[in-house]
Image (tube, grey):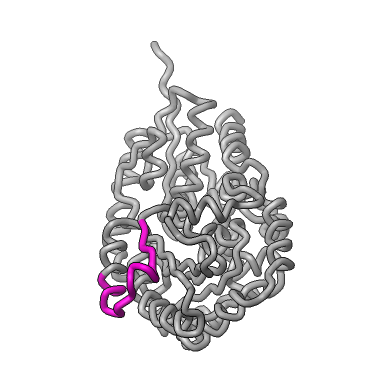
Amino acid sequence: MPNKPLRIAVVAGEPSGDVLAAGMIKELYQRFPDAIIEGIGGDNMQATGFTSLFDMETLSVMGLVEVLSHLPAILKVKKQLLAHFEAYPPDVYIGVDAPDFNLRVEKVLKARGIKTVHYVSPTVWAWREKRIHKIKAATNLVLGLFPFEAKVYQKYQVPYQFVGHTLADSIPLHPDQHSARDALNIAPTRPVMAVLPGSRGGELKALLPVFLDTMIKVKSALPECHFVIPAANQHRYDTIKSMLADRAFSHNDVTLTLANARQAMIASDVILLASGTATLEAMLCKRPMVCCYKLSPLTYKMMQYLYKAPFFSLPNLLANEALVPELLQEDVNPDSLSSHLISLINNDNSALISRFTAIHQTLALNADRMAAQAVGDIING
């Protein structure tokens, strides 16, 4: 009888998880070239040879209230995914972020005797710490991106390994701004502001109008300023293009591009962006930034009671101090945003960039290889 092929399940729920998982999957294929690796993932994961059984967009929802309208579709995917893995049991299941979905699946599979790994720690260090008991029940190992997470896992004796962040491995310590501007056909002498209103539809709806009005104010104060907006996909591109036309921006003022966001960040002098993984990438690109977020009023009220960390942007969390401005809700307005941005464009930011560089070095551990090695140890353990 021939040996059964090794089966590895990987489920990511949003674009940042798709990037993390893709690097790990490449390394897993190096170790296990005949493995069947399948689950849920986006374009990056599928480019490795990974098979996605469902559309990742179904899981890409944020906010306590916002999830409710998508719940039937999410529950349907969960049911079908579990049925698939009952028919074709994996040797290990790796849930990449998306904890509300993945931890539930992991708990069921672990009870069936399947080894489970959760890649990207849920924010138990920031809110709902008692979730750690659910994590312990659902997983054999948590792979974490940031050094400050380890403390809470040690407290509850939950297996945890800090692997660093794949973005820190892929971004140079000293990014080449000149080359990035050449690629985007932006003059080397103009002040440049990158604008990233988020990859999700909800983020775009909440933040893009405010960001565009902020650009108008910045342009008024700094007429030479050029803006570059990377769109996550063609649909987002068309939406942004339409809203730009409504505000009568000229092609000389704005570069709207489908090129990757990193190129836009490196080309810039300052970045306006939605809070999330993009703030980490902006920090690794060594660019000053203003980060902000708008939640539904009900979600925001709930989070005021639940969230205990002093910051919400990753640069500030990693530094444990306010390195970059963070704005929420009513503070996310053109007057406040433009004031911060104009100040950053006019200031000497060399001390900030030095701090960003030092943090970068603590995260560059070859995360893809470390994550794949940890998964390999679980499979062989």
Could you tell me which residue is drawn at 68 percent across and 70 percent down?
A: 349
Outermost residue on the top side: it is 1
Q: Which residues are magenta?
A: 242-257
Could you tell me which residue is drawn at 61 percent across and 50 percent down?
A: 168
Q: Quadrant of the N terminus?
A: top left
Left or right: where 29 falls relative to 375: left
* Rendered location of residue 177, percent (x, y): 56, 55
Could you tell me which residue is drawn at 36 percent across and 55 percent down?
A: 258
Is 252 included in the stretch rendered in magenta?
Answer: yes
- Front residue of 85/291: it is 291
Is 248 included in the stretch rendered in magenta?
Answer: yes
Whether residue 187 is visible here, answered yes or no, is yes
For the image, the number of numbered tags is: 0
Vertical placement of residue 147 versus 377, above or below: below
Q: Quadrant of the C terminus?
A: top right
Kindly indicate the quadrant of the structure image that contains residue 210: bottom left
* Rendered location of residue 184, percent (x, y): 43, 55
